[in-house]
Image (cartoon, rainbow, N blue to C red):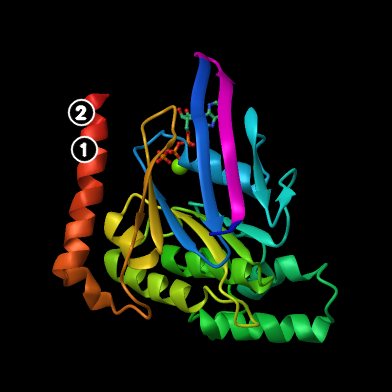
Amino acid sequence: MSAYISIADVTKSFAGTAGRIDALQNVNLDVPAGEFLCLVGPSGCGKSTLVFIIAGLVKASGGEVRVGGEPVVEPDPDRTMVFQGDAVFPWMTVAQNIGYGLRYSGISKTEQAETVKQLIDLVGLTGFADAFPKELSGGMKKRVDLARAYATNPTVLLMDEPFGALDAITKEKMQVDLMRLSVTDTGQRRTIIFVTHDLEEAIFLADRVAVMTPRPGTIEVVLDVPFPRPREASIRLSTEFQALRGQIRELLVTEEEEN
Ligand SMILES: Nc1ncnc2c1ncn2[C@@H]1O[C@H](COP(=O)(O)OP(=O)(O)OP(=O)(O)O)[C@@H](O)[C@H]1O
Ligand SMILES: [Mg+2]
């Protein structure tokens, strides 16, 4: 397995007001190109910190992250982050928000408008191009966020609990959309790291699930998800699915007890 994202001995400490906080300790993880990896772990174990480091938004205290062989030193448009809250600009319309990252992409204004239009349809926001975020529901704003992330057609998507605030049905729809959009325009599978607290979501989406320990977070175990793709929503009801869910839950409960 050759790693596309390689996380080697990553450590992160913060100098907080209440003293030093060791958030991450010797995190080692290799993610091959095209893999969908879900990251689960107890609250405060450093999941967000880890994805921020991979995005180049936070600097590690020690160790190194490489993407495509290059050390990560700053954010890159080919490595797009989707944040937990919605990060839409309230003063821009849906179309302007989605097209934001395309302004400096070197493609013509006409092509930009065409891409934005396609994405609006793709995420089910047809008819809302000129609406402002305040006119949208939470789930719709999340769709704007996702369309903006897909707009620049990144090879790497880093997603920090993107569906955490959505109702169960909207969430299922968004998961199916995400699986469909987990390939680039040229049909190549994106490499995706997706943080979630929802174990069913993790198993439904992932090729592998990485389970982290409580703070200072490190990777406790990485589990294979054996279900073939495309996956139907109904696989959640299968015995194999629920057994894997039980196994991950057990790991997290045991961690909690040991802490
Ligand atoms: N900028 C910061 N300054 C100081 N401490 C920080 C900072 N960012 C994160 N921390 C601390 O690092 C630890 C890990 O935080 P992080 O947000 O990465 O956890 P998490 O696993 O994403 O938690 P959750 O599941 O609740 O989102 C926490 O103890 C947090 O208080
Ligand atoms: Mg977090």
Secondary structure mostly seen in the magenta stretch = strand
Is 127 left, or right, of 168 in this rendering? right
Image spot of residue 52 (x, y percent)? 59, 44
Circle count: 2
Which residue is found at the position 41% from the left and 64% from the top? 207
Which residue is labeled 1 in the image? 253
Visible residue check, residue 74: yes
Compare residues 40 and 106 and report the one nearer the observer: 40
Image spot of residue 112 (x, y percent)? 75, 80
Which residue is found at the position 16% from the left and 71% from the top? 238
Magenta residue span = 4-19
- Where 161 falls versus 7 (above or below)? below
Q: Amino acid at mark 1?
A: Val
Visible residue check, residue 164: no
Is 254 left, or right, of 230 in this rendering? left
Residue lying at the far front of the rendered structure: 1
Badge 1 crowding class, 10 Å Cα cut-off, few under 14, some 14 to 19, many 20 or more, is: few
Is 199 left, or right, of 88 in this rendering? left
At numbered mark 1, what does the secondary structure look like: helix, strand or loop? helix
Is residue 178 inside the magenta stretch? no
Which residue is labeled 2 in the image? 257
